[in-house]
């Protein structure tokens, strides 16, 4: 990956042309997501329906994610993003027609959410893998910070904007906005050249998708530091997902609040994430980026414990704790993604990113199944304390694991087995 070690002259214009288009598309997607969830809530009033909607949105990434990443590594990534955006736009157009004619049902919404998630399962790894080939290594942490800043801004803006638009427009009108933002995402992709990792000559013909998938598994399994990070991501997702899902119960049961207080807590998280993302985009993190993630993990754990111990009369302290949690989120995730983008061979990035995402997301259904009964039995706050202690312990342990600290030094050189394609230098080729 020597090409990425050198400063890429003029990288900002092509990359941020694509990044801006994708940001607009993400705004449209969040508005549609808000509108559909609200429609399901108003139409059914069922917690089971909402839980099913969450499951439908997660399943494609969990089940198909690793195979989607394998295909992304074989295909032209620019075309994958164009096809994914266009597919999601067509699904949105179909759903808008159903709402316009008054024939939309809950099952149509489920189908649309599933299809949109399927498009995202291909789009996300293609964008992540393309970033490392378009952005110089030294700027990857800052770009990750910008991504986290955008996510934080969306958490603040999308819900109230979606609520406002629902009072002004019918659902098909919000779908139309999403179609416009999808076009804004596709147009730059038609003109910008995204470098492609050059495959070994004849590899595409000799290897099957299943063979490439197994190669990706062996690649990850042969990297002890990455395996530990994967285990960490699974454990963190297991303890943190219920913390978000149980927030309404914490508000009503412990603080005696209502929707307004829940909104304040969610906004505090978004503001913290916005500030943390801005800091990371300017600062870039410590020179050894994993230290930034570890520090963020420990501080986030302390904030979680504060949420677990805070008295019901000190709601303002819960707001501060959520703001700190949001602030640390970019510091944890941004450097980790930057490390993977800088060290994983470009030809393997689609598989590695989707494996990380799929394994972490696979813990969500399990954690929700466990956290509900546990919280009913011993109280919601106990789960926050458990999660906080887990965060802190994981952060402290990782600090003393050499394989993790040396993660950004790259994958250890191991002798490949006869069945595994030889490691090759990756050249950058245009579309």
Image (cartoon, rainbow, N blue to C red):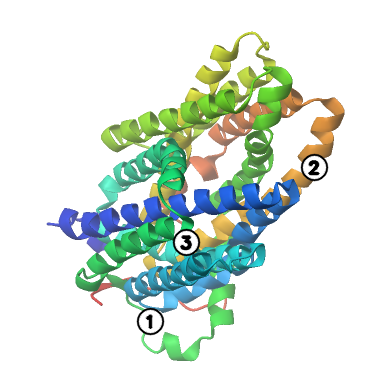
> Which residue is drawn at the image coordinates 69% and 34% (left, top)?
246
> Which residue is drawn at the image coordinates 65% and 13% (left, top)?
310
Q: Position of residue 244 (x, y in %)?
A: 62, 36
As drawn, which residue projects farthest toward the left?
Answer: 9
Q: How many marks?
A: 3
Q: Is residue 194 visible?
A: no
Give the quadrant of residue 261.
top right
Query: For this rendering, which residue is in front, 401 or 160?
Result: 160
Disc 3 crowd rating (10 Å Cα; few below 14, some 14-19, many 20+) is few
Disc 1 crowd rating (10 Å Cα; few below 14, some 14-19, many 20+) is some
Up-down relation of residue 123 to residue 405 (above or below): below
Q: Which residue is mark 3?
A: 413
Q: Nearer the viewer, mark 3 or mark 2?
A: 2
Q: Position of residue 32 (x, y in %)?
A: 47, 54
Side (left or right) of 14 relative to 150 = left
Q: Which residue is mark 2?
A: 370
Tell me whether circle 2 and circle 1 mark residues in contact (CB < 8 Å). Answer: no
Q: Earlier in the sequence, mark 1 or mark 3?
A: 1
Q: CA distance from mark 1 to mark 3?
A: 19 Å
Give the quadrant of residue 238.
top right
Side (left or right) of 37 relative to 186 = right
Q: CA distance from mark 2 to mark 1?
A: 46 Å
Q: Earlier in the sequence, mark 3 or mark 2?
A: 2
Up-down relation of residue 150 to residue 218 (above or below): above
Q: Which residue is mark 1?
A: 200
**Which quarter of the image is occupied by the C terminus?**
bottom left
> Which residue is drawn at the image coordinates 31% and 72% (left, top)?
196
Q: CA distance from mark 3 to mark 2?
A: 40 Å
């Amino acid at each position: 990956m020597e090409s990425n070690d050198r400063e890429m002259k003029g990288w900002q214009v092509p990359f941020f042309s694509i990044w801006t288009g994708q940001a607009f598309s993400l705004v449209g997607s969040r508005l549609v997501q808000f509108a559909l969830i609200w429609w399901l809530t108003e139409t059914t009033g069922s917690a089971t329906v909402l839980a099913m909607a969450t499951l439908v949105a997660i399943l494609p990434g969990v089940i198909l994610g690793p195979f989607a990443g394998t295909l992304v590594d074989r295909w032209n990534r620019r075309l994958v993003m164009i096809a994914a955006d266009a597919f999601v736009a067509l699904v949105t157009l179909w759903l808008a027609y159903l709402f316009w004619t008054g024939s939309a049902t809950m099952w149509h919404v489920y189908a649309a959410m599933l299809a949109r998630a399927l498009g995202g399962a291909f789009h996300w790894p293609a964008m992540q893998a393309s970033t490392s080939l378009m952005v110089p290594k030294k700027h990857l942490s800052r770009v990750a910070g910008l991504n986290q800043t955008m996510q934080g801004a969306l958490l603040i803006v999308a819900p109230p904007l979606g609520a406002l638009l629902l009072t002004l427009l019918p659902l098909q009108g919000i779908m139309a906005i999403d179609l416009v933002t999808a076009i804004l995402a596709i147009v730059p992709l038609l003109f910008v050249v995204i470098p492609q990792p050059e495959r070994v000559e004849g590899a595409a013909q000799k290897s099957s998708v299943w063979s490439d998938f197994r190669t990706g598994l062996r690649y990850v399994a042969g990297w002890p530091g990455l395996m530990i990070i994967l285990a960490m991501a699974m454990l963190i997702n297991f303890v943190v997902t219920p913390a978000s899902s149980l927030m309404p119960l914490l508000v009503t049961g412990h603080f005696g609040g209502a929707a307004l207080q829940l909104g304040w807590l969610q906004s505090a998280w978004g503001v913290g994430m916005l500030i943390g993302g801005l800091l990371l985009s300017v600062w870039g993190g410590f020179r050894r980026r994993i230290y930034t993630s570890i520090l963020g993990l420990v501080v986030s754990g302390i904030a979680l414990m504060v949420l677990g111990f805070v008295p019901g009369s000190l709601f303002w302290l819960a707001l501060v704790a959520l703001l700190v949690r949001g602030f640390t989120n970019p510091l944890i995730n941004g450097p980790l993604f930057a490390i993977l983008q800088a060290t994983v061979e470009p030809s393997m990035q689609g598989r590695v990113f989707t494996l990380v995402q799929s394994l972490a997301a696979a813990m969500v259904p399990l954690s929700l199944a466990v956290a509900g009964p546990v919280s009913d039995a011993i109280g919601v706050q106990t789960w926050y304390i458990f999660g906080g202690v887990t965060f802190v312990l994981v952060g402290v342990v990782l600090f003393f694991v050499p394989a993790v600290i040396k993660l950004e030094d790259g994958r250890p050189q191991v002798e490949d087995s006869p069945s595994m394609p030889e490691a090759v230098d990756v050249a950058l080729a245009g579309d």
